[in-house]
Image (tube, rainbow, N blue to C red):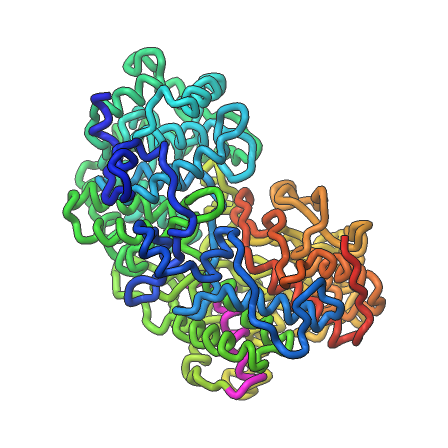
Amino acid sequence: MASSKYTLRIKTRLGGDPGVCSRPFYTKATDPEGWHLAVTGDLGRLKWTYVNEAAERHARPQDATTKFFLDRPMGGAPPVQGIRDAGAATTPAEAIHRATRFQASTQVRDLGCWAADLSCIFFVTPMLVISWYITGTAVDEAYLIELCRFMFHCQNPDGGWPTYLQETSSLMGTTLVYIALRLMGVPADHERLRKARPYYLREGGAVYLPAWAKFWLAMLGLYDWESTDPYPAEMWLLPAWCPVSPWKWMALTRQVYLAMCFLSARRFTVPTNELLDEIRAELFPGKFSSVDFAAYEGVVRMSKRLQLKSWVLRLLNWILIHIWTPWLCPSQLRETAQQRTWEILQHSETASNSTGGISVDAFLSMIAFYSAEGPNSPGLKRMQDASLEYLWMGPSGIQSMSIHGGHTWVTAFSLQTLVYTGLANHSEFQNNTLQAYEYLIKQQLLEEWNPCSCCHRPSRLGAWTFTTQYHGVPCSDCTGEALKAILLVESETSLRRMSEKNIRLAVDNLLLIQNPSGGYSSFEPIGAGSWLEYLNGTEIFGRVMTEHDYVECTGSCITALALFRARNSEYRSAEVSAAIERGVQFVERTQRADGSWIASWGITFTYGAFFAMEALHCGGRTYQNSAVVRAGCRFLLETQELDGGWGETLDSCISGSYVRAPSSNVVQTAWSCLALMCAGYPDPEPIKRGLHLILSRQKPNGEWKQEYPVGCGIITCQITYHYYSYSFPMRAVAMYEQMYGAGLAFEKE
């Protein structure tokens, strides 16, 4: 086909037989043994790389971390005196030790962290491909092979693709994946694409896409810019005190809209070519020029997780499209606004070391730099390189993560668990403890934001990010959990490598970012009321326009402050104690009538219960003296399953009511057991039943099978945290042994 010369550029093709090299990439396969999760660069960047040559693969075998994420056999660990290696564990201590050995073996040796695969939103994978195509990025063939394999794997029987992993097909997922595959070079007559087109047409086609998807199509010249939602760059000229200023928004959403405003203002469209002409004809079987795009302004196909625009936003969009932009907005103001957005984009690229806040803003910013500075832009080159760090390899292929990893987050919990289980000082795990401890110390943000007169962010000094220091975006609960991990290690070992100055910086940050309510948000203190959600135009995410108080973030932060107070009762003692008490009172006030707490960053009521009960415990509230704690215990007991476990689905978060899962989950069971133990629930029997379920599912090598995902975010996103299956079950078993002594039976399911 003549259009083949316009497909995504391939940098390095797979070696080997010339006949194989000349075949289309989508007919090839990589060798699973060739993939490695590698540490690259001076800042300790993690990236999946492929070793092309067989001899080099043989000389460089995969480590346990790589095998863990690829679900490949990992081999056995060396025997340890006093620990049996054959058959299932027979004591809690043996189960904990085996689980710790398994988890410790998957630590990233060159960094000291445990890595986190933050893949959850399926549509960011085709968005990455589209951004590469637009910016002329050349990509190794191995990545394209595995991206194609992953997208083929995720195709549903009806021919469509989902918006979110493991969901039913959607128009958005199908359209974006179809376009991405075509841009990569998969021909229109491929069986996968032939199967997809009938689904796409049944759903009504591109005119019924959510607003964000129409935006991406417009950049490719596959949709009419004038019929997309308005993204006025002029709003970036609003003073920071203005109630609707972007600086009042949630940080992640703000960054996405920043790039969208810049690109929309420029009406950026990649020059058309034969391939894009073919795709346009496939998406619009009738003549593209005859489509009345204006008639579909704001129109969207209903779907399971659709977040409809409010009437307020629909009215505002109409005013912006039909009155403000064509009649009222001065051209000079428009130019000034565009320059302001570009200035902030440049500052943000530097602040995040080219990684962006999340995938969508990283990919859009890459296109913005291409639009502003052309293909030879140094900033563009940095972002193209960094975009490869979003790729995550798994058993079904490679996909884009939604967030730039969560390495600090999972490492903090893993390190805490080493302390809670009493194994931080064990000779077998001392080095794991030391490496993780030093990793967290190095990830603290010890430099303030670079000066920028047009940016209005709270201080990040002393905080931690969700993933790595070079990512640059502070996160409240990551600060809390990282500080807790460090303080726990220092309280139980002889390690004292973090300066008191830097510990105090972390405390200062936690005191600074507490909301007036006593609660904590995720990234920044609340800038505007929940009314700002009326301006949510994403149509795919909920509770995303402004920050909110979160019970889980509050729990993480005030328990860290309580640990610090136990260590140092002098530094800002009155403020620390006041912050803890205000946080505890916030947790008490936000309990629902049925005794539950609803969380937003984990699923959902069990996650909320764990952090709430831990916070109440540090505030001196127990089952004996607190009606709130007793109500929380009652809710957990009412939701316990017959098998002794707990299990709920993402629908709990979406609906706001507890929705039972088809089966119990070991992580949600651990959260619930920990919550009951933090509460001081007087009857150990319900807890014992839950722990029996956890122990019954452990494999002889200490591993727990990955069950359905229990992480979530912004209402509609479901996230797998692989190491939750170790950190929380081990901690729960250890806590029971410490509180009640022996008595846990071992019965296999």
Magenta stretch: give its range: 474-494
Along the viewing direction, whichever of 653 and 429 lies nearer the viewer: 429
Whether residue 74 is visible? yes
Q: Position of residue 354 (x, y in %)?
A: 29, 55
Q: Position of residue 193 (x, y in %)?
A: 41, 23
Q: Main secondary structure of the magenta part?
A: helix
Image point (27%, 46%), residue name: 366
Quarter of the image for residue 27 reads top left
Q: Position of residue 58 (x, y in %)?
A: 37, 57
Along the viewing direction, whichever of 706 and 120 lies nearer the viewer: 706
Image point (78%, 53%), residue name: 640
Q: Is residue 132 above or below residue 57?
A: above
**In the rendered view, does 450 fall on the left or right side of 596?**
left
Q: Position of residue 579 (x, y in %)?
A: 56, 73
Image point (31%, 49%), residue name: 52
Please tell me whether residue 239 belongs to the stretch shown in magenta.
no
